[in-house]
């Protein structure tokens, strides 16, 4: 049986040791199941690995993310059921991740692919045997939304939101180093929010301000013209492949991203394959206030991802936005960017009209 930690690079290994100094060895049995190993072949970066527009530092898989989420939950709860809910929360993720939400017309919420989670767990002989061994029911681990430490609504801080904020800042756009992650993460505790519900938050305002000041420089990357154009192009490519009968929707839940890309670039429809090859070699996107004829041009919004954490303020607990002008400025700056700075039309400098 593989030890998962033996398969990751030194930076990820150290990063995980920050999230949880103790790696729960019992998780390895679950990690080695086929259903979780499948998402090791899906990137957290939603297709941005496959074009020269981006320069990602290294491969960071959806399994890496899911393990990171599980480690955060374990660190703060030591509850096996909550930890497994985090480990399983993306088990139904299709290839290219949220690009498929774009394909489904759900670019702003990015939740359209979550409904298969419970069924995938139930259909796995290996996972069901482990759950039965551990005396855990499917219902206790198939919906991480029921655990507020694992997941909650934007802009609250949850394990899921926490993890991808750190890992994206290591891989997509380098805004963190491990020492800063350690400093900010070690200041986090479990607090009760304004609704009396448990939520991760910060002990010290100064550390929370530092966290937001750094993290807010990453937020625009998740909705940038480059990001939206890339995700929508992959969505349109996959949709065209499906409409022409080259791939099925089920293929997106069974095949790796490299296998799907191989099908695209080698498909008999040269219009699709040539466009994708041009996408792979593109180094920039086009943007405009008006549609651009003769080019791949689309208009699409994206999910507004940001965090307004809780912080201890003397004997009370407040949102950092309400007690820190520094954090408020960073958050407002991003809101303005999201509302006014995104190009209406985006695309690539080649022709492609999806089927």
Image (cartoon, rainbow, N blue to C red):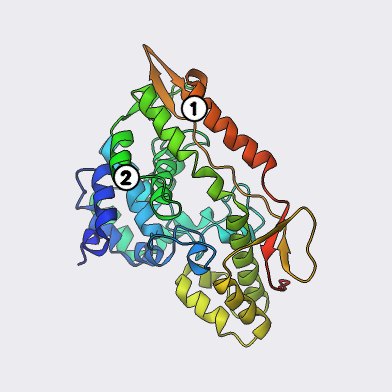
The residue tagged with tag 1: helix, strand or loop?
A: helix
Query: What's the residue at 44%, 23% (across, down)?
Result: 193
Q: Residue placed at 40% from the left, 63% from the top?
A: 39
Task: Tell me if I can see residue 81 in this picture.
Answer: no
Q: Work out which quarter of the rendered image holds the C terminus and state it.
A: bottom right
What residue would you read off at disc 2?
83
Residue plotted at (38% across, 53% down): 65
Secondary structure beneath dot 2 equals: helix
Query: On the image, numbered disc 1 is attached to which residue?
Result: 327
- Farthest residue, direction front: 283
Give residue 340's position: percent from left, percent from top: 69, 40
| Quadrant hosting residue 238 | bottom right
Q: Is residue 67 left or right of residue 119?
A: left
Badge 1 or badge 2: first in the primary sequence: 2
* Residue at the farthest bottom position: 268
Residue 83 position within the rendered picture, expressed as x and y whole percent measured from the top left: 32, 45
Image-quadrant location for residue 1: bottom left
Q: Relative to residue 7, is residue 336 drawn left or right?
A: right
Which residue corresponds to the image point at 39% horizontal and 45% vertical from the top-left? 166
User: How many neighbours does mark 2 have within 10 angstroms: few (below 14), some (14-19), or many (20 or more)?
Assistant: many
Residue 230 placed where, x, y %? 59, 62
Compute the Cα span from label 1 to label 2: 30 Å
Q: Is residue 340 above or below residue 55?
A: above
The disc placed on residue 240 is none
- In this view, the residue in front, 100 or 84, is 100
Q: Nearer the viewer, residue 343 or 85?
A: 343
Q: Is residue 219 visible from the viewing direction of this image? A: yes
Q: Which one is in front in this view, the residue at disc 1 or the one at disc 2?
A: 1
């Amino acid at each position: 049986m593989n030890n998962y930690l033996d398969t990751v690079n030194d930076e990820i290994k150290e990063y995980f040791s920050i999230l949880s100094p103790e790696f729960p060895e019992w998780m390895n049995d679950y990690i080695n199941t086929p259903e979780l190993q499948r998402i090791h072949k899906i990137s957290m970066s939603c297709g941005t690995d496959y074009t020269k527009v981006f320069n990602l530092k290294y491969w960071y898989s959806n399994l890496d993310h899911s393990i990171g989420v599980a480690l955060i939950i374990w660190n703060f709860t030591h509850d096996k059921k909550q930890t497994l809910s985090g480990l399983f929360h993306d088990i139904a993720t299709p290839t290219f991740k949220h690009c498929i939400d774009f394909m489904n017309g759900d670019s702003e919420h990015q939740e359209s692919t979550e409904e298969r989670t419970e069924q995938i767990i139930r259909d796995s002989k290996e996972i069901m045997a482990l759950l039965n061994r551990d005396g855990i029911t499917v219902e206790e681990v198939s919906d991480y939304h029921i655990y507020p430490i694992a997941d909650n609504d934007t802009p609250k801080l949850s394990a899921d939101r926490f993890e991808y904020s750190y890992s994206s800042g290591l891989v997509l756009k380098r805004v963190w180093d491990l020492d800063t992650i350690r400093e900010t993460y070690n200041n986090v505790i479990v607090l009760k929010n304004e609704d009396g519900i448990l939520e991760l938050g910060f002990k010290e305002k100064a550390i929370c301000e530092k966290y937001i000041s750094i993290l807010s420089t990453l937020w625009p990357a998740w909705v940038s013209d480059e990001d939206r154009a890339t995700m929508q192009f992959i969505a349109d490519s996959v949709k065209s492949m499906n409409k022409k009968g080259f791939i099925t929707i089920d293929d997106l839940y069974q095949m790796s991203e490299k296998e799907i890309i191989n099908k695209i670039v080698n498909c008999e429809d040269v219009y699709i394959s040539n466009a994708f090859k041009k996408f792979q070699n593109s180094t920039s996107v086009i943007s405009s206030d008006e549609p651009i004829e003769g080019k791949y041009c689309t208009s699409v919004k994206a999910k507004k991802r940001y965090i307004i954490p809780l912080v201890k303020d003397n004997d009370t607990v407040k949102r950092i936005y309400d007690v820190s002008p520094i954090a408020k400025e960073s958050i407002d700056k991003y809101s303005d960017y999201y509302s006014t700075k995104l190009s209406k039309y985006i695309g690539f400098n080649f022709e492609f009209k999806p089927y």
